[in-house]
Image: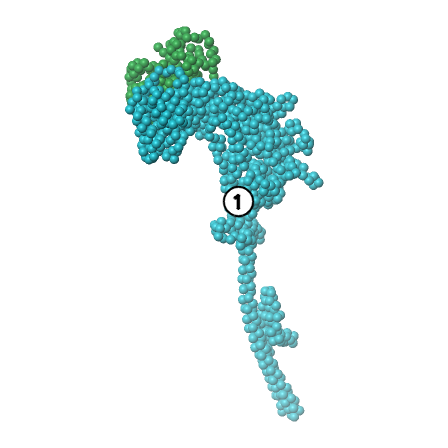
Chain colours: A cyan, B green
Amino acid sequence: MDRSINFRGIAGSAGNIMQGMGKFVFGNDGPESKEDSYVERYLDRISNGTIPDERRSAMTELQSLVAESRSAQMSFGAMGFPILLNVLKEDREDVELVRGALETFVSALTPIETTQGPKTESEEDFYVRYYTIQLLTALLTNSLKRLQEAILLIPRGITVLMDMLMDREVIRNEALLLLTYLTRDAEEIQKIVVFEGVFEKIFSIIREEGYSDGGVVVQDCLELLNNLIRHSSSNQMLLKETMGFDPLIAILKIRRGSAFNFTQQKTVNLLGALNTVELLLTGGPSSESGKDANKNANQAALAQKNILDHLLLLGVESQWAPVALRCMALRCIGNLVLRNPQNLDSLAKKQVGEEPHVQPALNAILSIILRTSIAQEFVAADFVFKCFCEVKNPNGQALLASTIAPHPNQGDTHRAASDMPFGSVLLQALVSSDVNGDMEACCRASSVLSHIIKDNLQSKDRVLQIQLETPTPSLGRTEPLLHRIVTCLSIAASADRENDQSSHLEESYIQPVILRLLIVWLVDCSNAVNCLLESAVHLNYIIELASSKRYTACVRGLAAVVLGACVLYNASREKGRDAFAAADAISQKIGLTTYFLRFDELRKSLAHPSSEQRHRKELSRSSANSMSDFQEIEEDETNKDDHHPVLSEIFDSQFVNFLNKLEADIRENIMDIFSRTKTATAVLPAELEQKNGEVDGEYIKRLKSFVEKQCNEMQDLLARNAMLAEEFVKTGGGNTADTSQKPSSGRERVQMEALRQELEGAKRQIESLKTEKSQIEAEANHQRNLAVKMESDLKSLSDAYNSLEQANYRLDTEVKTLRQGGSVSYPDVEAIKAQAKEEAEKDSEAELNDLLVCLGQEQSKVEKLSARLAELGEDVDTLLQGIGDDTAIPDDDDEDEDDEQ
Amino acid sequence: MSYAYLFKYIIIGDTGVGKSCLLLQFTDKRFQPVHDLTIGVEFGARMITIDNKPIKLQIWDTAGQESFRSITRSYYRGAAGALLVYDITRRETFNHLASWLEDARQHANANMTVMLIGNKCDLSHRRAVSYEEGEQFAKEHGLVFMEASAKTAQNVEEAFIKTAGTIYKKIQDGIFDVSNESNGIKVGYAVPNSSGGAAGSSSQAGGCCS
């Protein structure tokens, strides 16, 4: 008794319970040995010491002591717990000391002798177990991994803990919690507890507690169960083989109409069971081999137990059930049918509701999508359609697509949707927009439609053919559904902008979801691309979406993907609507670098933390935990970060992968387009050679047209080349270059280049004309000089002639006078005179002839040059003005002479 | 699905003696020459019939490496049967049998049936342990003995079924308290042949474990 008072002195009043525990655990029966005093001394040094090193060394000593001596363990048990627990609490920053404390605990609790004393069931034993479990649980929260390893090293350690599950209720409940901690992320421990038959024990406790109506213990059981099957298909298989799924289904059973009885605890219990179902339906970790086989087996086994009915009751028919529960049940429905033909089929055939108000389950789920005010519920119900349609269920898609048609009573909004076929309800939602331009319904219906047409060409074409009356019937035309979707997109965009201030933080999912529909539709479907590009407005609008800073990175990126699909899946040959036109529009109006940057931004905006981590939450068990857990679930999923939760759910990793693949194809395709000509003219066509019997003229004509064609193409390519170069320079130049100073686009640059070349050509022509002109001028001068010389020659000639004439006349007169004087005496004079005259005339005639010939030659030269000058556009008359006065004379003379002759 | 009894087995022995191959041959009837090293413990199951009763065998294949020894020990107590395996072409695996057996005796329940298997008997040209040595060791330690080949499937069925037969006989003889599931035996629910009691009629099982 003295000792125990002593202990109290050391441990303080807070240690009362622990002290009691120590007494019960290790008893007081041992001989009071020197170990006792050692333990006491060390504990004193640890609790009252002030020098850190000393406390640490005391801890080390204590640890090795309790590791070796059973009696030291008992002393420690009697005194040590409160002190060491206090160390854990107060000296957290001293890692070494804390580690020492934990090691001491482990050592103190590790049996040294395997032979145990005779076991007697007593109150004392009960407390031993109770506090030991509590202590272990406390230790696990501090040092999970270490304790897990330590327990594995103790043979039968886990087996003993498992036995506690069959102990009295208080112990059982504590053991459950301990096992839940212990099995977390510890595969080996999980296997051992499974080997020890934990599944049977879990379900027997659940049954005893009343299934979902049970208390927090049921919640703990399910938590433990989920720990065990979360990452292990072999544990799942074992559960299926040893227990079957009946007990699990029994938890999910709720009575129809028991809607108002969802207490918080019941909700949490049901969530836990649904979580189990989901884990089973999604199989083990993706790396595990045989995962799919295991998943399929679970799907089949659960379906065999009619789990679909229970899930529909929870998810679809119990509109009073808490929303988290409904969402979870919907998710399970999705996972139940995923890639499972039989389950797909039974979902398609399933009816919900009670007579006479029954309707197909799929219709009911669609109306949840359209009606719910909770984004999470929309996503969960949408997930069902995703699972129903997207993965290898073309028949299901076709089935749903086949009903899409305008309903005769389309405008009648009061009509109950349950009376209308699936597709009519969907279509009505697609084209509806309320007065405020709220496109929520359209967006949700778009999401469903995108599942229906995904990877299904037939459905895409079918939906493409749907014609709707235009909103302004005065035009009296119809428009394709696809056009209406683009209109809805633009309405959504403008509505978003108006609401910009109010909901700035929350990124809207409406546009992204509609854009996703467009992407899904266009992929692989050239008809859809053609339909979209029918109106140039559409392309421009999408380009605007992809380039304007007004929109979020997600919207811009998705718009960029739409544009890419317009290039990639474009089979049109029509000018302005073909792939080249789309590619050119992208590179001109956005620029290729910016364009491809959009994809990166999109990827970043869609990157979200893995859902695995999101669903993990810290296990805590307090009286309030069921309540807080439940709220956590709600809040966890609605206010994650600034990113809209719907976005990360809808644009899941699967869709992101799809986009990545698409992006790669788009990149390649656009590169291909820029390395090709539109008409794909062969560089050296076979017909370049002259054909047999082809006339030269025709051959030349043909070659000419070929060259022309190539020339055009070259212009085209040059324009693109310039555009690319510009882009390259812009991006390569970095931020320093002020691009706004170079407004000229690539095309203009090419035009300028052409003009410059033309100008140069003209210049060269002018140069050559100039030299030609000066040559001609020089010639003309030369001719003028010649003419002047000839004129003077002529003058002297005529002078000579005149003087001859005069001489002749004088002689004549002389002869006359002589004849009158003695005509006989001068008989010879007349003869001589005649002779002389004849001689003179002969001489002058020859000379004149020479001159005329010469003149004639010059004249023809002048004429030729004049003609050439005129041809070259020179004004010959003015050019010759100066010369004319002089040259005209010989000309005229010439003619005169000719005439005279 | 329904069974009269469920027996839990463990397979123990040095690394590389063919424990996982024996299990695969028994559950899937196939042989996988290259097998990943077993990490921790793997699990397999198969239904067999003894004395016209459906018996489910749940077999836990352990890692032979020393580093997993402490984990493996956790499985001893809950097992009704153990297949202790050595490789007839590797002497050291035979030499280690005593240490395995000591482990089993220490941690398992006293009534655990241990079957000694000399595996890889198809490789008799490389034999390093004679049949007689194996037989002798089994006799000394009170084990059932068999040479088997996971590759050719020789004696694989027999080894598992004979072990089950021995356990069944022990139940019939009242050695096991079947209500205590920690012995590795579980009584099933739907027993087609309800006439069977602990009378220990000269059953097929009885014949098995002479």
Q: Is mark 1 on a helix, strand or loop?
A: helix
Is any part of residue A192 visible from this angle?
no
Q: Quadrant for residue A543, please give it.
A: top right
Q: Where is residue A349 in the image (x, y as percent from the top left)?
A: 59, 24
Between A675 and B5, the one nearer to me in the picture: B5
Query: On the picture, is A18 further left or further right than A519?
Result: left
For the point 31% across and 22% down, which residue is it?
A71
Q: In this orientation, which residue lies closer to the viewer: A330 or A480?
A: A330
| Relative vertical location of residue A86 with respect to residue A669 in this rendering, above or below | above
Classify 10 Å Cα crowding around label 1: few (below 14), some (14-19), many (20 and above): many
**Image quadrant in which the N terminus of chain A is located:** top left
Please tell me which residue lies in front, B145 or A688.
Answer: B145
Question: Can you give x and y, in whole percent of width and height, for residue A713 in the image?
Answer: 55, 49
Asked whether, in this view, residue A774 is left or right of residue A197, the answer is right
Q: Where is residue A251 in the image (x, y as percent from the top left)?
A: 52, 21
Which image quadrant is residue A384 in?
A: top right
Please state the horizontal and vertical placement of residue A772, each as a whole percent of the image. Answer: 55, 66
Q: Is residue A757 visible?
A: yes
Closer-to-camera residue (A200/A57):
A57
Q: Is residue A792 above or below residue A202?
A: below
Residue, disc 1? A595
Name the residue rendered at 59%, 82% in the picture: A800
Of all residues, the one furthest to the right in this rendering is A474
